[in-house]
Each structure stands twice: as C-alpha cells, then as structure tokens.
Image (spheres, helix red, strand yellow):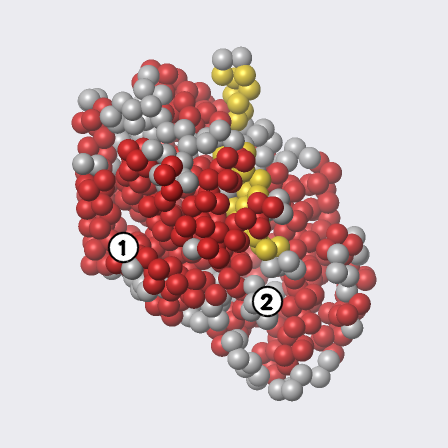
Amino acid sequence: MTNALPHDIHEFMRWPWARIEPFYQALAERPLDAGSVDRWLRDWTRLFELISEGHERLYVAMTLDTSDQEIRARYHAYLDEVLVPSEAAEQRLRRKLIESGLEPAGLRVPLRNLRAETALFREENLPLLNDERKIGAEYDALIGAQTVEWQGRELTVPQLKPLFQSDDRALREQVWRLAHARQLADREAINALWQQLLDLRLRIAANAGCASYRDYRWPMMWRHDYSPEDCARFREAIVEVVVPAASRTYERRRQRLGVATLRPWDLDVDPQGRPALRPFANGQELERRSATIFAQIDPQLGGYFVEMCERGMLDLDNRKGKAPGGYCTAYPVQRRPFIFMNAVGIHDDVQTMLHEAGHAFHVFETAPLPYAQQLQIGMEFAEVASMSMELLAAPYLAERQGGFYGEADAARARVEHLEGIILFWPYMAVVDAFQHWVYTNPDAARDPARCDTSWAELWGRFMPGVDWSGLDDEMMTGWHRKLHIHRIPFYYVEYGLAQLGAVQVWRNALADQAAAVANYRRALALGGTVTLPELYAAAGAKLAFDAETLRDGVALVEHTIAELGR
C-alpha cells in the first residue's frame, strides 16, 4: 500500500490526516513475522520519513523568518492536524514490533529505545507536547525580534558581535550594555513563557507516572548508558581539573590586556591588540573556503559538502527575524541535511560551520541504513561528529591550504578555539547543573527569581575569573539566553561529553590523520545501531566522566595552545 504514497514531499505536505491514516492502519493490521518484518519496517520507515520531513521543512521555514505569520500558522496546523495523530499511530506500530518478539539485524539498540518510548507514552500527553513546541516557537520569535539601534542602523543582537572585538574598551562596554539592555527588556516575557513550559513538562511527567520530569526525560533521550549521578561526577571533575585551567586562561588574557579585572566585554577582543579576525565577507565565501577544507580532510566529506552547496542546503547569513543560533537538521526522505546559521563574519562563524558540517556528514554517512529507527542517534555521539570535525579541520585553516587565514592568524584562530574548549566545559557544567536543579526542585523553579539565584550560585562556582560586579541582572538571567533550557530540556551535557570524545579523536589524528578520519567515518556510519560506549570505541575514544581522562584532554589542549602561541 505504501507504493501509493507520493514521491514529492511537497505533495505529501498537503495531505490531510484522513488521507494518511489508512497507511498506518494497514501497517498495524499487517501480519508480522520473521519473513515479513524487513518489508514491514521499510514501509514504516517510508511513512515515518514523510511525516518527519514535512515537520522539518515547516520548522526550517519558520526559523528562517520568525515574522512570517502564514508559515507559523502552517507549522502549528501541521503539529495539530498531522504530527499529533501520527504520534499516536507511531505508538501502535512500536508496540506491535515490540510484542512480536522479533529482533531484526541492526535493531538491538533501536529496540531498547522503542521500549523506553513505549513505556512512557501516554495519549493525553500528545496535545501537551504540541503546546510545548508552540511555546518554544514563541521563545524563538522573541529572541529573533531582538534588535537595537546602533549608529543609525537597526541591528540584531548577533550582528553586534564584531563590535565586541574592537580594541576600544569603552566602545565594547557600550555595545555590550546596549545588547543586554535589549535582552533584559524581554525578561518578563521570557519568565512568563518559562512558567508555562515548566508546568507543561511537570504535567507530562506526571501523566507518564514519573516521580519527576528528569525521570521522564532521561529514558526519552535514550540515556541508557549513564545516569544523573554520572553527570554530577563529570561536573565535579570539571571543578577539579578544568576550572583551574579556565582561571589560568582568563588570567593570561587579563595580563595581556593590562586591565585590573577582566570584564564580560573583554572576552572577545584579541588580548594582544591585533585586529579582529575577519575570515569571510559573506555566506558564499564561507561556503567556498569551507568546501576546500573539507576536501583536504577527506575527499568524500568534501564531496558531501559540495553537494550541499549545489543543492542550496544551507542558509548562513544573519538577518532580522531569523531565529537564534545554528543547527543542522535532516530531511529524512532525501536522507540529506540542512544547515542553518547566523553568520556575521567572525571566527565563531567558521567554528559553527565546521561544527554543523560534522552533523551534516553524519546524515550522509548513515543514509544507507534501511530503517528509520537506526537513524535515531543519541546526541552524546552526534556531537562527537560535530566537535571532532572542528578539530580535524583546524590544520587546514591557513590560506595556503585554501582556508581563511595567513599562517599567523591561522595559529591564532586555533588558539582561540582551543581556549574556547577549556572555557566551555565550566559553562556546560552551569547549564547542566541548572537543569538538574530545576527538575529536582520544581516548586522553587516555578519562581523565575529563584531560577536567577540558582543560576548565579552555579555561575560563582564554575565560572571564576571574570568580574561581573554591578551586572547582577545581566549575569543571573544568563539562563534566559541559553536556548537549550527553553527548547530542548536536559540537552547540554552531551556537548561536554562529546567535547572530551572529540579531543580523543583529535589526539589520534595527531598520530595518524588518515586512520583517525577513517575510524571517525566508520563510527558515524553505524548510526544508532550500537550502544553509546560502542560508538565512542569505534571512533577511537571512550565515553568518560572521570577526572583522569579529562586531565589528559586538558593537558593536550594547553600544550597545543603553548606550542601555537610561541
């Protein structure tokens, strides 16, 4: 029956649920045994991918222009009229497969995920999950609409980033305060959305019979291979190993700048007074130079990126109304990625491109896997794909290899990236610890003022080295500006774990680049067919939470910074 499904995704996106539902019904009623399971799974995959791509295309369109009310209305209608009923239908198929007792090749780990999702599924949660998505879209719209007047021009807050690299400290402070004043203007609006989100999430967990939202969210994120206690152990390792390294990094910057204390507007300027790195003029140049770098890392990876450029699978430049941040998503029917960015011509944009391209290459490498369930990859390893790419690409940043910079600036860019790794781990710990506090103290977290206080306490523990005196409101509302807290709860420790995995992949590449890249690609191609520790091992790394592994990684990063800085 699935042969009657359209090949054109745009045609499918016009179908009402009444026209889609019979395909689910047919799958639910079809006999399932060892001889038929492969065809059944492939048919389910095709239907699931059409539904998913319809959602992803509307989501992308909405993030490209958050002011487009027609697109937002179409997105909300798709959620209400197609996605919600499809999730109920998906549950029936998950249960049918589980109850069959069948375990086709390559589905050992995906079945573990399906069992967790099935156990937590409640039909009464579907409209609540839908409401959560809609409130998240409201958050995106609030952030995307934040603009300021600067020298007679209306600029988005991200478009101010190049000014933070000015060697004029007074100007940096003026711009920093201007940006944060604009963000604080939405304080009450974001607090109101937060209270709605938190109440929804608590209701969802209670409906599923969970004692806390964390108990609900953990298995829903397929976190079978580590626990909240492991996260706490990782945060303590960061306090022991990384916070002192971050303090050394901040102190080195303070001394080079020659300032009494390091202020928040001193973190992006070059501490040696060199002009800010300006790697590209526009998105087209960013594409072109990135393509050259990827081709040198691996010809096949380079070919993937060229295909993306030729097929318009990127939207890179920042503009008013665009949702915040950057992401790579997949269009499941095509088995091809799409990269979204807010580039403004600074080195951070280069890092974002390298990062999101790693996610894109993951989509390409998993494309041959036959079943949609095999493409469900925990973000702990998906982020290894992206963060490893940042480090694997680093040796090719110089113009002589087709990159963005002269030799001195290429070394400088690498130092900035490596210092950023050290400074990131403590920030990751703040975000992760904050989310654990929220969902184990939900009554307190309902009060935005107590969220502010919790964030400030965590900031003081993990983020010494920068003087925030007189900036209490700006500092304690940092949780407002962390998209993941509002849009993807509990998603952030993945970055810290993956960064440690990526440093291990990089260590291997220093010894044998070709072998390290080959292992990286083989691990990506496994998709979600093996456990998280097995994925790390395939890439030549280990999933780790301990101080010893972290100490080895920090030592390599600091040693390389010293070598490049000579």
Determine crowd level at label 2: few under 14, some 14-19, many 20+ residues with C-alpha closer than 10 A: some
Displayed quadrant of residue 507: bottom left
The residue depicted at 73 percent of the width and 80 percent of the height is: 30
Depicted 265 relative to depicted 139: above or below: above
**Residue located farthest toward the top when viewing the structure as drawn:** 152
The residue depicted at 46 percent of the width and 25 percent of the height is: 160
- The x and y percentages for residue 552 are 21, 55
The residue depicted at 42 percent of the width and 70 percent of the height is: 531
As shown in the figure, which amino acid type bears the numbered disc 1? Leu
Mark 2 sits on what residue? 372
Can see residue 396? yes
Labelled disc at residue 192: none
- The x and y percentages for residue 351 are 41, 41
Q: Please state if 81 lies on the left or on the right of 119 as rendered.
A: right
Depicted 295 relative to depicted 193: above or below: below
Q: Please state if 566 lies on the left or on the right of 425 as rendered.
A: left
- The x and y percentages for residue 69 are 71, 36
Q: Secondary structure at mark 1?
A: helix
Displayed quadrant of residue 560: top left
Mark 1 sits on what residue? 510
- The x and y percentages for residue 392 are 36, 51
